[in-house]
Amino acid sequence: MIQSKSTEVDRSKWGKGPWDGEFDEYTWTDEVSGYACRVRRGPVGAFCGYVSVPKDHPYFGTEGYDLDCHDLDCHGGITYSRISKLKGEEVFVFGFDCSHSGDHIPGMSAYGIRSGDGEVYREFEYVKKEVESLALQLNSATPEGRIIQQIRKEIGI
């Protein structure tokens, strides 16, 4: 379910590319987990992805390198974990970014930094799928989520 989408980042110095026509921010509620999800483009063009979990989630408050023990798998690993507010409720946000070695960051050319050979631009659809995967992984850490995962496995979804 789409909650909002917008285009706000100045791309005038980036040149043409697959980022033309993409949203800069897109938020929705994941249909399986019920978690709030968000894809947001940073000022130099790389997307970041975020999933917010409620206060009763077993990973709530897990920060930094403590996340390694949870084996959360997303592009470049978890690079953001903070308490936040969402609609007046305290949530914990897990996030990742697409500005790692090998990622093409379109806005860097405006600063005279050229792309390296073989860099890949991480398009919106790629980042959205990574966010959805992260939401499922976080959901599977809960008792209800483990039941849903087992049912999905049994019926072949």
Image (cartoon, rainbow, N blue to C red):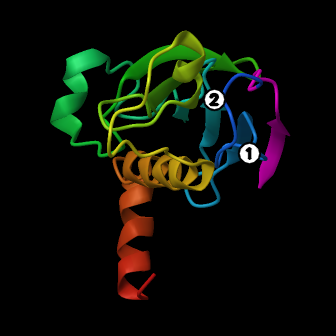
Q: Is residue 90 left or right of residue 73?
A: right
Farthest residue in the bottom direction?
155
Judge the density around disc 2: few (<14), some (14-19), many (≥20) Cα neighbours within 10 Å: many
Asked if the magenta segment contains residue 30, the reply would be: no
Q: Which mark is residue 34?
A: none
Question: So how many labels did they put on this image?
Answer: 2
Asked if the magenta segment contains residue 9, the reply would be: yes
Kind of element beneath mark 2: strand
Residue under label 1, please give it. 22
Q: Quadrant of residue 107?
A: top right
Figure check: 70 above or below 151: above
Q: How far across and how far down the image is residue 125, in percent?
A: 59, 55
Q: Which mark is residue 41?
A: 2
**Residue stretch rendered in magenta on the structure:** 1-11
Judge the density around disc 1: few (<14), some (14-19), many (≥20) Cα neighbours within 10 Å: some
Farthest residue in the left direction?
69
**Identity, as a three-letter code, of the amino acid under mark 1:** Glu
Image quarter hosting the N terminus: bottom right
Q: Is residue 128 left or right of residue 11?
A: left
Figure check: 141 above or below 42: below
Q: Are marks 1 and 2 in contact (CB under 8 Å)?
A: yes
**Identity, as a three-letter code, of the amino acid under mark 2:** Arg
Kind of element beneath mark 1: loop
Name the residue at 41% across, 20% down: 81
- How far apart, in angstroms, are the residues tagged by discs 1 and 2? 10 Å
Name the residue at 79% across, 47% down: 21
Q: How far across and how far down the image is residue 121, in percent?
A: 49, 44
